[in-house]
Amino acid sequence: MSNELTVRVNGRQVSISVGATVAAAMMIAGQPCRTSVTGEPRGPLCGMGICYECRAVVNGIPHSRTCQMLCEPEMDIRSDE
Amino acid sequence: MNSYSQERFDVLVVGAGPAGIAAAVCAAESGARVGIVDDNFAPGGQIWRGELATHSDSTESSRWYGRLKNVEIKALHGNRVFHQPEPGVLLAESVAGLSELKYRNLVLATGARERFLPFPGWTLPNVMGAGGLQALVKSGLPIRGKRVVVAGTGPLLLAVASYLRKHGAEIPLICEQAPWSKLVRFGLALTRFPQKIGQGLRLRQDISGIPFSAGSWPVAANGKNALQEVTISRAGKQQTIHCDYLACGFHLVPNSELPALLGCKTCNGSVQVNELQETTVEGIFCAGEPTGIGGVELALVEGQIAGLSAAKRNSEAQVLFSRREKYRRFARMMDETFCLRPELKKLASADTLVCRCEDVSYARLQEHCSWRGAKLHTRCGMGSCQGRICGPATQFLFKWNPDSVRPPVFPARVESLIGPPAEQSIPVVTGGHQ
């Protein structure tokens, strides 16, 4: 069994180890998780599901807290606009 | 989401960090029917995150995981408690659905979060909490070869620097805001805590060779779309360091929102408890960081006392009181050592954002004289985190005290707020919601 799986972050394929979170995949891809209300790019801050800075669109569901969510094969991950 | 479940417990524990595990284990070993509910996908909380997978038998965490495995406890991971519709009932939400958790006694072990202070550039991607970056690395973020400046205050900085370096990061500097005089006093006082001496010496070895600066703090983070360099204040001079990440946290603050929602009295943000760890609400106990930041040893002993008390084993709980007192002394020392210096109140410039959810600047907050006024006029603290990040910051910057807590204590889906179907026989309608 492979220890890696593939997800798509903003359309780009990213290989990541099994057990990694969606937030980690977004950081590896160098993509912001969300855009703030005044248009700033934002990435994870607290790493424990409290700050909501890492929320993104995961398999079409917006506002998903990516640091509390494990990557699954072929997951579609997009920055929250 | 459409599943719905109901559970009933003698003792329900919220939070599966060290305090929650200890409480659940002690209550279950006493014969109580115990449930433990936690937002993360594995037990351990933040401090033991990822340690379940390491299979080492010698650590404190593995001893507790061992005890946890040997008792019957209903564990609900990936579940977040957001509301108490009536006394004795909590609602928790997961990706899959809603759980209604009924309890006779409750132990709140909701842990702590990092305190963040605003400074120019702190909202850039890759400026993260110290514990925040460590959590991400434990969750699959490769750190080998990356340059990480570790800054802020508290013992966590050293633990994080040590962890990151072990995993291949280069640490050009650790900036601790506390002055050397306090750190030396803290170090000398550690000799009164045998367990801490060993930890301290190991940590000292782990971080040997990493430049460490006391009385030093970040003043600005710079970069275009993500962090590229950080400017720090060190011995009265400013110095700029290129780095990939800034891991920056100013010690910890208790997660006391759920206890406050349930009516438990708090004082300076910490949940008030009696000697049995019972809060001001009968049958609701609290253990670990929410009662005051004290570290893992205090959390474990408080958790055991709370679990035993909740299972009506008061005499067994009493045996642990002296050990708790010892670690409370350590907690008071930590408070004194890592209290924030006034210079940190001047880090934010007029346009520095303080509330990251609603993008409210320091200048806009300066126009107000209370947390409530700022909330009403600027939306500060009214975004998704519900003031968990900007609240402790404004408390330090402006001495504002937070308002009462209102449900839901975390953002929840509309379906969860509506609650369970009125009649269990009514089929759940799928579709029509996203």
Image (cartoon, coloured by chain):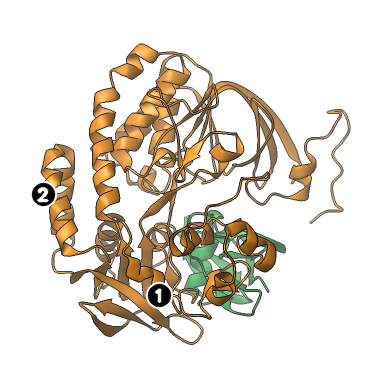
Q: Residue at x 57, y 70 (%)?
A: B365
**Extreme residue toward the bottom, this view:** B224
Give how far across and how far down residue B50 sits, in percent. Answer: 39, 49
Q: B332 or B19, which is in the foreground? A: B332
In the picture of the structure, the residue carrying the numbered disc 1 is B347
Label 2 packing within 10 angstroms: few (<14), some (14-19), many (20+): few
Q: Residue at x 29, y 63 (%)?
A: B167
Give how far across and how far down residue B159 sits, in percent. Answer: 27, 56
Colour seen for chain B: orange
Find residue A7 and name its label.
none
In the picture of the structure, the residue carrying the numbered disc 2 is B188
Alpha-carbon distance for marks 2 and 1?
31 Å
Colour seen for chain A: green
Amino acid tagged 1? Leu
To which chain does the residue with label 1 belong?
B
Identify the element where label 1 is drawn.
Answer: loop
Depicted B236 relative to depicted B65: above or below: below
Q: Are marks 2 and 1 in contact (CB under 8 Å)?
A: no
